Amino acid sequence: MYGNLHELDIRSLLELLERCQATGQLLIQTASVFPNSDHWSIPSQDDSFWLLSLSNGQIAYAVDSNHLQYQRLQDYLRRYQVESAIERLPKIENMRLPTNLLQVTGRALPEYNYLWVLLEHHVLTAAQGREILQHIIHETLFDLLSLHEGFFMFQSNTVVEPQLTTVEITPLLNQLMRQRQQWKQLYPYITSPEQCPLLTKNDELKQALTPSAYRSLAVACQGELSLRRIARYLNKDLVTISQALYPYIQRGWLQILAEEDVPIEPPVVTGPTPINIVCIGAENDVRNQIEDILQRQGYLPVITDDPIEALSIVARSRPSLIFCALELSIWSGEELSYSLRNLPDLTQVPIILITPENPDPIRLTRAQLFGVTEILVPPIQEADLLSLLRTHLKVKDLDHQIL
């Protein structure tokens, strides 16, 4: 079965496949010309495609051309605090889609394949895997329902295997159609799931929200995480998160960056790269001592007492090492460490917690559970600090480190 979306829209097409209890693969593709009905090849760079695997009229998996790698899966793994697990597992090399998209299997799809690898290595439970897969299907269909131009083809008896779960089509469509209507009500402030909110007025937001809600918002809204990725991190759907942010965007407390305004990764620079170090809080004497030692070793550390400013600095600069005081003006050091760990690409950055003398051991245990790498207790010896730098910055001879 094949055709175009002028003849049969997405919702009607899915409902038809559900009534027929169809098993097979549904491919939907944007293209300037009608694809060859006998052999649909991978679209050109300007085209997009969506691939849905159905089993007895229910959806077993859904993916689009933007999610053939691991970013979406890593985002969903954060709620189980195992997002770094993919990095520890053996990489699946040279994984490419077959020329005919309607012949793909589960093992040919990187995201689906890695989900099963995580299950097989007992990183995820079966219930967690099913929940992630249901969110993936929901997210893909939400975008797909906005598509009105394109072509489709359904091929029977080719299903993604092994199969983990299925989602009923009619209840999902009813839910998504309501969400699409709610989404349209957010215009013109919010127009795309890929827009990134940026916190612009801290004081107003702090007064309007509970401390925990404010901390979550401060971490998420640094101008680098899209609305969609925020929803994944917080285990909420896109529309719910966007509706929650909408009043603050209207008031100007949050700014929504257009997709073209979102910062991109800086180009790779050849030659020696400066090592960025951020110091957050700490008593003046201790901080001055750390700053003096770092400067004598050739570093130019960034110093701040404001945890919110620290989040912004860390999100922008991607430091190689973070010093964070246990006692801060707004949050505790362990709470800020947890927030830092939830910023993109910060899961592996060492965080050194600077404590008062005779710190509370319960708080130290809590801090380590929240992602702190090392504990530094005053009085600080220069030899101890240099040892930490050697360990975590992989610098062999600090006395000759020139930046």
Image (spheres, rainbow, N blue to C red):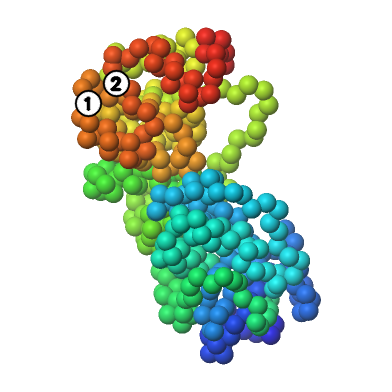
Q: Quadrant of the C terminus?
A: top right
- Under mark 2, the amino acid is Val
Q: Position of residue 53 (x, y in %)?
A: 59, 74
User: Is the residue 353 above or below the residue 17 in the image?
Assistant: above
Q: Residue furthest bottom?
A: 20
Residue nearest the observer in this picture, 299 or 92: 92
Q: Position of residue 317 (x, y in %)?
A: 50, 32
Say which mark, if any, is on residue 201. Answer: none
Q: Position of residue 292 (x, y in %)?
A: 40, 11
Residue drawn 57% across the image and 70% down it: 162
User: Is the residue 397 above or below the residue 232 in the image?
Assistant: above
Q: Position of residue 237 (x, y in %)?
A: 41, 63
Q: Is residue 176 left or right of residue 377?
A: right
Task: Pick whichever of labels 1 and 2 is earlier in the sequence.
Answer: 1
**Residue identified by numbered label 2:** 377
Do callouts 1 and 2 mark residues in contact (Cβ within 8 Å)? Answer: yes
Q: Quadrant of residue 77?
A: bottom left
Residue drawn 70% across the image and 62% down it: 97
Q: How far apart are labels 1 and 2 at the CA level?
A: 8 Å
Q: Please tell me how crowded label 2 is: few (under 14), some (14-19), or many (20+) other residues with Cα within 10 Å.
A: some
Q: Is residue 394 left or right of residue 179?
A: right
The reply to whether residue 235 is visible in this rendering is yes
Q: Quadrant of the N terminus?
A: bottom right
**Residue identified by numbered label 1:** 359
